[in-house]
Amino acid sequence: MSEAKEPKDTEIQDVCEEISGTLEAAFDLLVTRRDRQYADAISPLDAEREALAEEHAAIETARVNLERLLPAKARVAQSEADRLTLEGKHAEAATKLEEMREAENAPVAMTTRQSVIATRFESIAGERQAIARRIFETWYGECQAVVRAGETGLFITLLDGLKASFSEYQERTGTGGTLDRPFSFLVKDSHIQNLTAPDRSMEWVSGHKWYKGHQ
């Protein structure tokens, strides 16, 4: 009978995957919170902008159609006013001409309303930008909190903790060696240096990029 294989020890690999998963989840959460808050905040503005855009388009269609028909309407109105005047219906004739003047002024009123809408579009754009800035500033603080927690976990808890644990283990096990025999020390400088990714690695480049500005 073949000997039963011992179960593979995956405890450390599981921890590594958990750490990576936690950081990825933290990143996803931060981005999702930012985008959700921004979308919720600008939703009323977007609804208003959409309604105004539809109104602007409808006004433009009506204005073009009205301007195309105005000359013919003016001729008809003038003809009816002349007929009413000849019939002695001067008040009705005046009313007919006044209605025509109002119709002729309608495109101007429409253009004025379109200008008001265009101005509101600009205001909405400014309000959206102000919201984006406000949300970013609040969100940036959340990013800092998560990053600082990660830094504390990596540098203080893990790296500094391991370095201290190396020394404690070396002393407790009597493997410290002597100064005249430096290579007899269990814990060597290379053990400390090689805990983190090597020079010019992807991690080293990224870390150097982030921390060089603090010098």
Image (cartoon, rainbow, N blue to C red):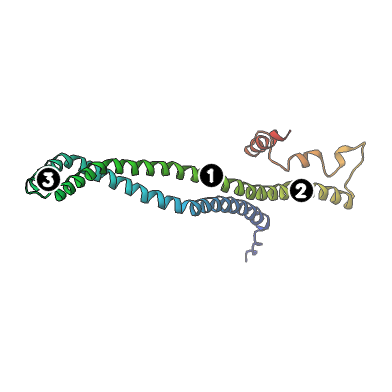
Q: Position of residue 27 (x, y in %)?
A: 58, 50
Mark 1 and mark 2 lie on one chain; the one further toward the N terminus is: 1
The three-letter amino acid code for the residue at tag 1 is Ala
Secondary element under disc 3, as helix, strand or loop, is: helix
Location of residue 121 in the rendering, given as x and y in whole percent from the top left corner: 41, 43
Q: Which of marks 1 and 3 is in front?
A: 3
Q: Please, what secondary structure does the residue beneath circle 1 have?
A: helix
Viewer-side residue, 66 vs 31: 66
Q: Where does label 2 land, which residue?
A: 156
Q: Give the Cα distance between marks 1 and 2.
A: 38 Å
**Number of callouts:** 3
In the picture, the disc for residue 81 is: 3
Q: Are marks 1 and 2 in contact (CB under 8 Å)?
A: no
Rendered-image quadrant of the N terminus: bottom right
- Tell me what residue is drawn at x 28 percent, y 47 percent: 58
Compare marks 1 and 3 and give the one earlier in the sequence: 3
**Residue at the limit of the structure toward the bottom, as seen here:** 1
In the image, farthest residue toward the front: 88
* Residue drawn at 84 percent across, 44 percent down: 186
Q: Is residue 150 left or right of residue 78?
A: right
**Residue 177 in the image: above or below residue 23:** above
* For discs 1 and 2, the disc positioned in front in the rendered view: 1
- Label located before the other in sequence (2 or 3): 3
Location of the C terminus by quadrant is top right
Horizontal side of residue 6 vs 191, given as left or right = left
- Between 136 and 20, the residue placed more toward the observer is 136
| Mark-to-mark CA distance, 2 and 3 | 93 Å
Q: Residue at x 62, y 51 (%)?
A: 23
Q: Residues within 10 Å of mark 3 (few under 14, many from 20)?
A: many
Numbered label attached to residue 130: 1
